[in-house]
Image: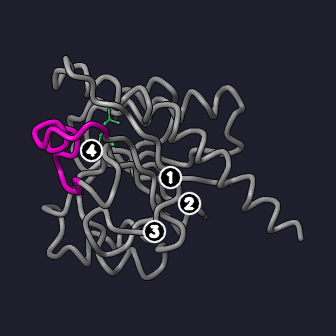
Amino acid sequence: MKIAIFASGFGSNFQAIVNAVNARKIDAEIALLFCDKKDAYVIQRANEQMIPVISFSPADFSSKAMYEAELLHLLEEEQVELVVLAGYMRIIGPTLLEVFSNQMINIHPSLLPDFPGLHGIEDAFNAKVSETGVTVHYVDNGVDTGPIIAQEKVTIEEKETLASLTEKIHNVEHKLYPNVLAQLIKIHQGASRL
Ligand code: GRF
């Protein structure tokens, strides 16, 4: 299956997925990395792996719809079947969602529906809850509201710091996301053989 990864920043989840594809744990071809920030570190990671990088931002277009129309065109041209958001810091608009709503997944660093939005780890830490976690979900038109595919809990210990919690969450993400992706692709391949 051809997948595209959308990311905006550091790209540690991008790297975890690339590693799993290289190790043949995920039966997919990464057609492209799309990055909306031209100086993001994730671009360097993709270059090292010789994964094609496409980078532009909504500021390069007259509207968000035009920006997404260009993205849609790229995805269709490359025959991408699944879009994997990995730290892509933008809301997906109707132009992309109309076509890709059942073929677009996201990872979020909390146990949704708790603590959606930009600061999932920090918000859970500040709320002093005893557990938080990681969620993989389909993307819909809300902020981290789409149907949940998988979740994994992370305990917040008495002596936890924000830094130690952040590290624990990322470690879970880097295993959970590749595993879920591998499963989804297997299910899809099984279904298309029927
Ligand atoms: C991750 O915590 C992910 O859950 C969230 O954004 C962060 C991206 O980190 N959506 P990275 O760029 O993959 O290192």
Ligand 1 in which quarter? top left
Amino acid of disc 4: Ser
Amino acid at dot 3: Pro
Quick one: SS at disc 3? loop
| Comes first in the chain, label 2 or label 1 | 1
Instruction: Report helix, strand or loop for mark 1.
Output: strand
Q: Residue furthest right?
A: 194
Spot occupied by residue 64 in the image (x, y as percentages of width and height): 20, 73
Sequence-first disc among 3 and 2: 2
Q: Are marks 2 and 1 in contact (CB under 8 Å)?
A: yes
Q: Which residue is mark 1?
A: 4
**Label 4 lies in ligand 1 vicinity (Cβ under 8 Å):** yes
Residue at disc 2, secondary structure: strand
The quarter of the image holding the N terminus is bottom right
Name the kind of residue labelled 2 in the image.
Answer: Leu
Please report contact status of discs 4 and 3: CB closer than 8 Å, yes or no: no
Identify which residue is drawn at 41% across, 54% down: 106
Q: In the rendered structure, find residue 163 and report the number of the disc placed on it.
A: none
On residue 82, the disc is 2
Q: Say which quadrant the C terminus sits in.
A: bottom right
Earlier in the chain: of badge 3 and badge 1, it is: 1
The answer to whether the residue bearing label 1 lies less than 8 angstroms from the nearest atom of ligand 1 is no
Q: Ligand 1: does it lie within 8 Å of the C-beta at label 2?
A: no
- Residue drawn at 16 percent across, 21 percent down: 161
How was this image coloured?
Answer: one colour
* Figure quadrant of residue 145: bottom left
**Towards the viewer: 90 or 30:** 90
SS class of the residue under badge 4? loop
Q: Amino acid at mark 1?
A: Ala
Mark 3 lies on residue: 147
